[in-house]
Amino acid sequence: MKELLFKNITSVREQAPLVQNITNYVVMNNTANALLAVGASPIMAHAHPEMQSMQAICQALVINIGTLDEYWVESMILAVAAANQNNKPWILDPVGAGATAYRDEVLSELLALKPTAIRGNASEILALAKHNTTATKGVDSTSSSLEAIEAAQFLNKEYGALVVISGAVDIVVSEESVDQLKNGDALMTKITGMGCSATAILAAFIAVIPNKKEAALAATSLMAVAGELAAKSSQGPGSLQMHLLDKLHSITKEEYINTVKILD
Amino acid sequence: MKELLFKNITSVREQAPLVQNITNYVVMNNTANALLAVGASPIMAHAHPEMQSMQAICQALVINIGTLDEYWVESMILAVAAANQNNKPWILDPVGAGATAYRDEVLSELLALKPTAIRGNASEILALAKHNTTATKGVDSTSSSLEAIEAAQFLNKEYGALVVISGAVDIVVSEESVDQLKNGDALMTKITGMGCSATAILAAFIAVIPNKKEAALAATSLMAVAGELAAKSSQGPGSLQMHLLDKLHSITKEEYINTVKILD
Amino acid sequence: MKELLFKNITSVREQAPLVQNITNYVVMNNTANALLAVGASPIMAHAHPEMQSMQAICQALVINIGTLDEYWVESMILAVAAANQNNKPWILDPVGAGATAYRDEVLSELLALKPTAIRGNASEILALAKHNTTATKGVDSTSSSLEAIEAAQFLNKEYGALVVISGAVDIVVSEESVDQLKNGDALMTKITGMGCSATAILAAFIAVIPNKKEAALAATSLMAVAGELAAKSSQGPGSLQMHLLDKLHSITKEEYINTVKILD
């Protein structure tokens, strides 16, 4: 399995997928650099008149609602419609799900357009599922990723989306299974946009790897393993940010395989 | 006093206040990372439909007009109204005050809503005061912070706001006193967004520390002391940026107390 | 020639031109930091009501369409009109030229307003010229800068703009000559916004140096030489980004002259 996952990392480097990002202002720079570091190519564009044609030249789409507003939500809807029409994968990052009614309305609209995959922290995944059922436990910002498995399975069943729950343990919930990854470092929570970068990398992998679960395991573990290795030579969040980009770019097969921890 | 200020730094780390930022595009990433580094939590949001409810879950609000436009100004007004209604502190960063008539009109409107605190460089503080009185000396981009004390006192008296003037000497102007801090490094002027980060950190401290003056002295000195220590191991603005985040995150009581210079 | 170019670098540091940037969200932070590192001062502003008066206080204007939308395009038109009226130089960065019809329409409108200079990669320069003539070879994202010389000459003749084509070889196409620079490092293509920073630095130099060709050679070589030197001490794109800012800020005459390669 570890060999297969590293092969996926190599595939992204070789195929260099073009990923369109409609994402938040805070992380646009990081996200673009993270995509470049893993070998993909980022495009950030949101103008309504070009959503159709821009999506046509990309291999995947990221929708991240972090700093949404009315214009950008319409950009998102237009781009998702184009992606769905062209059978391109699109990945939803429900930043701040549950924080305001406006976010939840927008997320409801986006969910109905059936994202290929969703990545969020436990609170966001719980909020996303709660909005559509009363079966889950409600939003809790201190939730661990394990507490959101049921919510993720609901989202998977209801919308067909693969779900990645980020946390101390990262969890990939697919139709076939629930897989846990146990890498990363607590210092990663002290840099903004780590989750957003994970979502963009997930999009690059899903663009290239036919098996969604294998794409998600490779993308999610790459981010966590690179962060874990980068943290070892970091004195704080500033240097971690730098070392993470270096490591995403240069990680070797040996480093990856010796570090990655997949729980069965 | 130094012991007390470090205690305030510890309080922010422990209480992790949630700070909403309506700030400029240039510094959103830095600002979020600076807040995380001192132990606070950043939220960036500006959509009109969520200003009321977003502000309700935050402990403080930053209004920074750096890249303002008509939509964002309305976001600011909505968020400030919510903050005032909920008795939450809000901090004004009057970026580019005096540069254009449009900025001055917007600042006039914001001032009337009575910010809890204001942080700017000497030119900005002078421009802000001039706009409302003929008593000050006008805008001068080469003004030292000392030249803006009178303007800051005017703003404090007229609007009740604590005022921080950033510069080679940082000055905190409160109802009770005028306090000067003498830390920092000239290289900090070669990185964009240092002032904006100082404003966001000020918001985090005012959210948590009941005494505004003590909050401002702790926040302002933390930024300057961390910058001064970071500059010692930096070869230029790129490495200073990295070391500053590391130092904001990890500064010890000993480092802080041995470095901070409060003038009486 | 090398002595003259370094003299230009010193002139920018001494005169510290104020450069207005209407640029894309992804690179605003980098661009501001790159301008500060070479000794210039950045202003980012786009509100319609202040375009006229903001441009009046700046020495140059950057128009970068990376994340354009309808509001921002109008900001660009307003700012360019003000720059033209005040005889201030303005530099066009045609990000993603040829990618969508919308971009090409906007670029057509901007070209008609006669930019002082244009900087882009080969594909963008080819697309920009193709849009207005059938004489060029069409868009090719794998084009080398050498293949775009004819297109650049067309743009120079038709609109009077100096053109810089970025690539493994950087090319400056002016009325008088075609000059090639052979510095840089392949790792620079793995960081977002390197081209956008090059454009902003070009604007700072054109603001200060009367001879456009000498300004462009100095600006373009400074970016490439600093990148080349920075890459030597970098382990990947994260550290390159940091070292590049350090080097832009501190490069010495000796380092520059011993590294720069101008082909005749």
Image: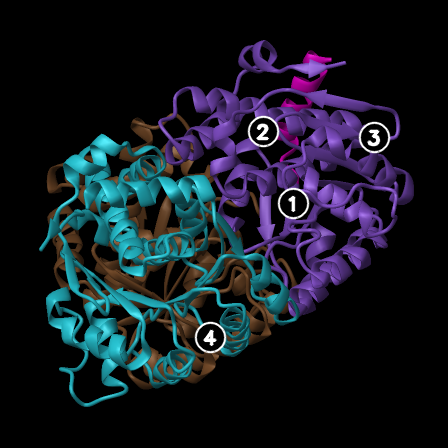
Chain colours: A purple, B cyan, C brown
Secondary structure at numbered mark 3: loop
- Give percent across and percent down for residue A196: 60, 43
x and y percentages locating residue C164 in the rendered image:
37, 56
Q: Residue furthest right?
A: A157
Secondary structure category for the residue under label 4: helix
Quick one: SS at disc 2?
Answer: helix
Residue underneath mark 4: C76
Do discs 4 and 2 belong to a common subunit? no
Mark 1 and mark 2 on one chain: yes
Q: Give the Cα distance between marks 1 and 4.
A: 27 Å
Q: Please state which of the two labelled residues, at mark 3 or mark 4, is closer to the viewer.
A: 3
Choose mark 1 or mark 3, whichever is in front: 3
Does any portion of residue A229 appear in the rendered image? Answer: yes
Q: Are marks 1 and 3 in contact (CB under 8 Å)?
A: no
Give, as a three-letter code, the residue at label 3: Ser
Is A88 situated left or right of B65 in this image? right
Q: Is residue A6 magenta?
A: yes
Q: Find disc 3 in the rendering and name its residue.
A: A174
Query: Residue at (25%, 41%) from the top-left corner?
Result: B226
Q: Are marks 1 and 4 in contact (CB under 8 Å)?
A: no
| Residue B236 in view of the camera | no
Residue A84 on image: x %, y %: 83, 52
Write down the residue under mark 1: A19
Q: Which residues are magenta?
A: A1-17
